[in-house]
Amino acid sequence: MKKRIIWSLALVCAMCAFSRIGSAQKQDSVVLFGPTGSHLLEICSEPPVAAGDVVPIERLAKGAWNNGMCVGYIAGINDNEMAQVATGKRGLYCLPPGVDMAQMAKVVRKYLEENPAKLHLPGGILVVSALEQAFPCH
């Protein structure tokens, strides 16, 4: 069930990203298909809601959306990296057995919090940097 939810969120993220194709204003413009580090940190820092908490429905919906976008975005970056590895390219990072998406999200959030000077960079670059630092290939 969790894998199906993660795949669904990744698909939604991809659809949102690709819906902006062609939005560049000039030929020398760069079109980002994902968040900057600042935005990624914001969506990955949504406080959790525990069972039994009484919260406004708006907070619950925002939290679910942000957590889904955070995990889905990181999953998409990771899937791309794993696809590169599957085609014979050397991986930029090597996840040990047992690492799940929640752990990867914590690693990325910690990296973003500890590197505020990089938050203007594209989120995808920062996700790879965080995972590369936390899970280097030996």
Image (cartoon, rainbow, N blue to C red):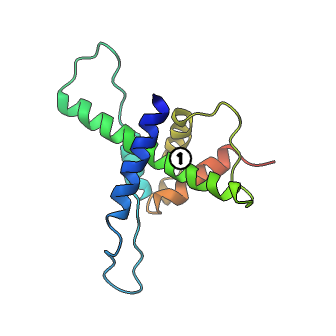
Q: Residues within 10 Å of mark 1 (few under 14, many from 20)?
A: few
User: Which quarter of the picture shows residue 125?
Assistant: bottom right
| Whether residue 70 can be seen here | no
Q: Is residue 19 above or below residue 107?
A: below
Q: Nearer the viewer, residue 88 or 57?
A: 88
Query: Where is the N terminus found, in terms of image quarters?
Result: top left
For residue 109, side relative to residue 31 (left or right):
right
Residue 100 x %, y %: 58, 33
Q: Residue at x 50, y 47 (%)?
A: 74
For residue 88, side relative to residue 36 (left or right):
right
| Whether residue 76 can be seen here | yes
Residue 84 x %, y %: 65, 59
Q: Nearer the viewer, residue 2 or 70?
A: 2
Residue 104 x %, y %: 56, 39
Q: Which residue is mark 1?
A: 114
For residue 19, side relative to residue 8 (left or right):
left
User: Which quarter of the picture shows residue 86?
Assistant: bottom right
Residue extending furthest bottom?
A: 27
Residue 89 x %, y %: 73, 61
Number of dots carrying numbers: 1
Q: Residue at x 53, y 44 (%)?
A: 108
The disc labelled 1 sits on which kind of residue?
A: Glu
Q: Residue at x 31, y 74 (%)?
A: 23
User: Which quarter of the picture shows residue 44?
Assistant: top left
For residue 6, side relative to residue 103 (left or right):
left
Q: Nearer the viewer, residue 112 or 89?
A: 89
**Quick one: SS at disc 1?**
helix
Residue extending furthest right?
A: 138
Q: Is residue 50 above or below residue 83?
A: above
Q: Residue at x 37, y 63 (%)?
A: 18
Q: Nearer the viewer, residue 35 or 9?
A: 9
Residue extending furthest top?
A: 52
